Image: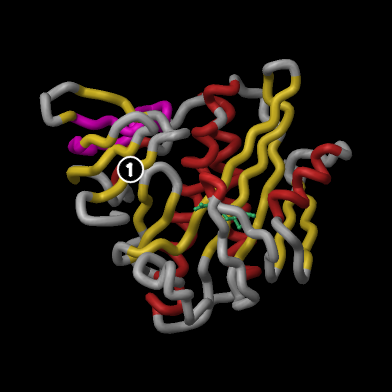
Amino acid sequence: MKRRMIRLEQTDSTNIQVRKLAISGAEEGTVVSAKLQTDGRGRRGRVWESPEGDNLYVSLLLRPDLATECAPMLTLVMAYSIALVLRRATGLEIQIKWPNDLVIHGKKICGILTEMYLQEQSIDYIIVGFGINVNQEQFGTAIRHMATSLSVEAGRRFDCEDLLEEILTVFEGQYEKFLKYKDLSCIQEQYNLMLVNRDREVRILDPVREYRAFALGIDEMGGLRVRTAEGAMEIIRSGEVSVRGIYGYI
Ligand code: BTN
């Protein structure tokens, strides 16, 4: 993948900027990063607090030749790639909360927002946006109980540009492999070893009902395999469904 980096001091949302570039024909590998976002977006229409505090706010443009149902797997490939880099950089046991949050000591340090755009029912482009709390020391009261940063956890600061370079390099390698197999068989085992939900009881919040189940790990398509209280095996696909711990976020 040929990388083209666009570094902004400030923007509304790097996902919005990449979308504009994609519409005007930008190529796969276009990356927009910003030091501050005024309209940072999270999943499910939530806000992603994006202060100027040495964090990473980054979006990457992809134009894969993939069936639409394979697209959500890219989020897991990115989560896995970021986890590998952050584990190496910090020495901390960073874990993945399925499908795509990264956590340390039960608190979130990274979120990923993947958006797919179609043309005549096939993928035109995909934007993978990620926010990592790198050197942020203070968090608003609304998120303080569930958010942390690398610097808070590791007790030292990190160079955002170095981390970004490594993340993109690792992701590019994983993306190439993923495109070959079009499933997650290459990372399934390693991803499951990093999975915070694994072998735990979770609450499945789907739009029609909430129920408890025992999480076993991901399958090769990135779905979460769970065993329900009645003993039935189910596979939770991302999308509308949210998975929480019994007592809270984890
Ligand atoms: C989430 O956990 O809800 C996903 C958060 C994704 C935040 C990143 S920051 C860079 C990119 N631009 C955005 O507006 N959102 C993503």
Could you tell me what secondary structure mostly forms the magenta stretch? strand
Point 76% across, 68% down: residue:
10
**Secondary structure state at the residue bearing disc 1:** strand
Question: What residue is at 71 percent from the left and 33 percent from the top?
Answer: 125
How many marks the image carries: the answer is 1
Note whether 195 is above or below 165 in the view shown: above
* 89 relative position to 232: left or right: right
Give the quadrant of residue 123: top right
Which residue reaches farthest left?
230
On screen, residue 250 above or below 98: below
In depth, the one of 14 and 247 nearer the eye is 247
Disc 1 marks a residue whose amino acid type is: Val
Quarter of the figure that contains the N terminus: top right
Residue 20 on image: x %, y %: 82, 45
Q: Is residue 226 magenta?
A: yes
Q: Is residue 132 visible?
A: yes
Q: Which residue is mark 1?
A: 243
Residue range highlighted in magenta:
212-227
Colour mapping used in the image: secondary structure
Image quadrant in which you'd find residue 28: top right
Decide which of 129, 82 is in the foreground and name it.
129
Residue 10 lies left or right of residue 206; in this view the side is right
Q: Is residue 185 visible to us here?
A: no
